[in-house]
Amino acid sequence: MSAPLEIVLQFGLAPLLWAGIIFGLRQCLPQTHGDDTCEKAYLLAMAIALPVAVVAPMLSPFLSEAPLPLPDWSGHGVVDTPLNNAADAPKSAFNVMPALAYSMLALYVAGVVLFAGRLTLGLIRLFQIERQASRQPDGIRLSPSHRISAIASLSGHIILSDALAEKLNQQERKFILAHERAHLDRKDPLFFLFLSLFEALFWFNPFLLAQTERCRHAAELDCDARVIGKETKMRSVYASSLLHALKHTAGNALPCAPAVFSLGQKGDYRMRIESILQPRPKLSKTLKHSVL
């Protein structure tokens, strides 16, 4: 087997199939969508195929290579007819597999460059937004950018759009800032950056990409629960602050943001609002262990 084809199989096809198996198995298990611990566990289960693919070839020299006890059919009615000239030799057909493997590797590298470039541009814009933001007495920073609502940055600051801040009442502002502080407490800016890097490396794996999105959504739900857990009578106000953020950045949300209150799909917002207004009981420890 050629080296390029072996690389494609080990680091491309094998992780893809393994992630697909995990994705399929979870459909048969109790529903855990939105649980932060379980979503991270599923992501880890999908990602473990890569280190296995790296380690497995290293272990091959230690594996037994004893020949199978197959019968020897030589000499039983078979007459060898030596080839007298090169014209009698079978002509080898053009092997397309190495060319296909090289093409797939080139496509993979192009995809990594594209996704990594998109991530880099997004981070540069975020750093520019933070640099242009003005410091406030309460420790937050106000930004003139309309591409964000609120951000928990990698540097540990909370950046709020000044246009959105003008539309919020005191309680809504308090909720949004509390949500972003929950992201900082969870170290989500770094975690979300890791997810973005993971997506750049495995852009071809739809199962893994779907799981990274679930991890982001689960992180948002957990931050919502942390904020509203102490303000159970203010659920409608908190949901209202979420809708304000959605309207503020509709169609303009900055991609690749490490942690953004307004980042997400419309379906995610609907699920978050439903979870805020009609919270479901958390999974028991027994159920969590049964799905891991």
Image (spheres, rainbow, N blue to C red):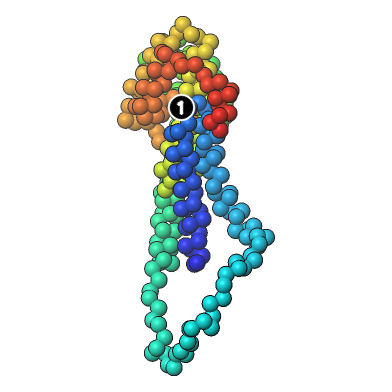
In depth, the one of 281 and 130 nearer the eye is: 281
Q: Is residue 265 above or below residue 56?
A: above
- Residue 99 placement: quadrant: bottom left
- Residue 148 placement: quadrant: top left
157 relative position to 271: left or right: right
User: Residue 175: where, in percent of width, then height?
Assistant: 47, 15
User: Residue 125: where, in percent of width, then height?
Assistant: 44, 37
- Count of picture labels: 1
Point 40% across, 63% down: residue: 100
User: Residue 160: where, in percent of width, then height?
Assistant: 45, 22
Q: Is residue 252 above or below residue 64?
A: above
Q: Is residue 210 above or below residue 175?
A: below
Single out the residue that lies furthest toward the front.
77
Dot 1: what SS?
Answer: loop
Q: Which residue is mark 1?
A: 31
Q: Dot 1, crowdedness within 10 Å: few (<14), some or many (≥20)?
A: few
Amino acid type indicated by mark 1: Gln
User: Residue 142: where, in percent of width, then height?
Assistant: 46, 23
Q: Is residue 53 above or below residue 41?
A: below
In depth, the one of 271 and 144 nearer the eye is: 271
Single out the residue that lies furthest toward the top.
233
54 relative position to 142: left or right: right
